[in-house]
Image (tube, helix red, strand yellow):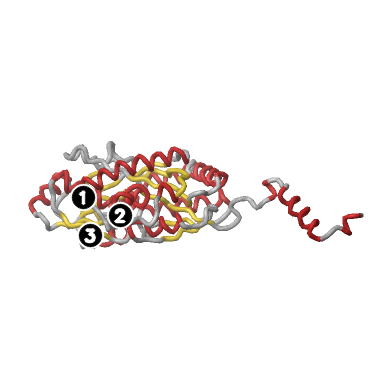
Amino acid sequence: MLHKHLPKWIGAIAAALTCAALPPQAAAAYPDKPIRLIVPFAPGGSTDILGRLLAEALHPILGQPVIVENKPGAGGNIGGDFVARAAPDGYTLLLAAAGPTVINPSLYANMPFDPARDLTAITCLEREHNLMVVTKSMPVKTLQEFLTYARDNPGKLSFGSPGNGSPAQLAGELLKQKAGLQAEHVPYKGSGPAITDLVAGHIDFMIDNMPALLPQVKAGTLRALAVPSDARATAAPDIPTFSEAGLPGFEVMAWKGLMSPANTPPAVVDRLHAAVAKALQDPELRARFQELGAEPLVNTPAEFAKQIADETLWWGKLVKSTGTRIQ
């Protein structure tokens, strides 16, 4: 019973050593509290729609609520920077899209964060078709009719996007470049507000992610002209590709992914990757994605990081060719 007479500091050291020797299972398992999923755009767009579907699917798998928070602005930079500055503990995640991760580094003169340095790639979630739509009041039903109408009305048309430098804006600028059109770009703080104005007739056309636009087409409030893909979308097989509609070489696909702050522990990254992979195996969730024009796609963190690096170069060339730049 000599330990009763030992100094208190020796007992404290012994207790600390005992705790340090505990197996990992004895520590609190990740996650042990709700997770925030940051959507860097306003509600109503494809990033928001798919983010909420994913959050709902991850809840039972992770055993904790996944709470979606919209932080729009600056082409997704506000939300991306928020995650980049968060603690790397797996409790603040980014529903990543091309804008803030692979386009903005070439577009913005002063980026608040470096996606390659300040974020950790976890997995791609899906690749999705874009879709070109026009207002119901525009007297065109095909892409060729639109091109003729636009050329006959130079400078009179406008197109919307989720924000300056967004993939939707660059797609519109690329269309103008390839087809020799004049049209004014109108930026919004997300696809939702842009689509609202498009349906109301305040702008004339838009090329954006299919998950946000296809429901409007099915509801009859917008008219679809073509998809800028190498093949027709499973969700809308009756809509031709740009090549089929008479404008070859116009292909702009989109994607969504999951990222976390840099230096997130590998064990947490693995846990999240496994959870997403399991969620996207669910037939109901896969069907919901596909109905919206998104094809589920899970890759490894290394593959996703390479995808981001490769697309940063591709979009950088497009940004340069269109002359788009934001100070």
In front of the other: 233 or 260 = 260
Task: Name the residue carrying label 1.
Answer: 323
Helix, strand or loop at disc 2? loop
Q: CA distance from mark 1 to mark 2?
A: 12 Å
220 relative to 138 in the view: left or right: right
The amino acid on which the numbered mark 2 sits, given as a three-letter code, is Tyr
- Quadrant position of the N terminus in the picture: bottom right
First reached walking from the N terminus: tag 2 or tag 3: 2
Q: CA distance from mark 1 to mark 3?
A: 17 Å
Q: Amino acid at mark 3?
A: Val
Tell me if 235 is positioned left or right of 136 in this view: right
Rendered position, 163 above or below 23: below
- Left or right: where 2 falls relative to 260: right
First along the sequence among labels 1 and 2 = 2
The disc at residue 267 is none
Q: Residue at x 23, y 46 (%)?
A: 320
**Residue 108, labelled with which disc?**
2
The residue lying toward the viewer, choosing from 39 and 111, is 111
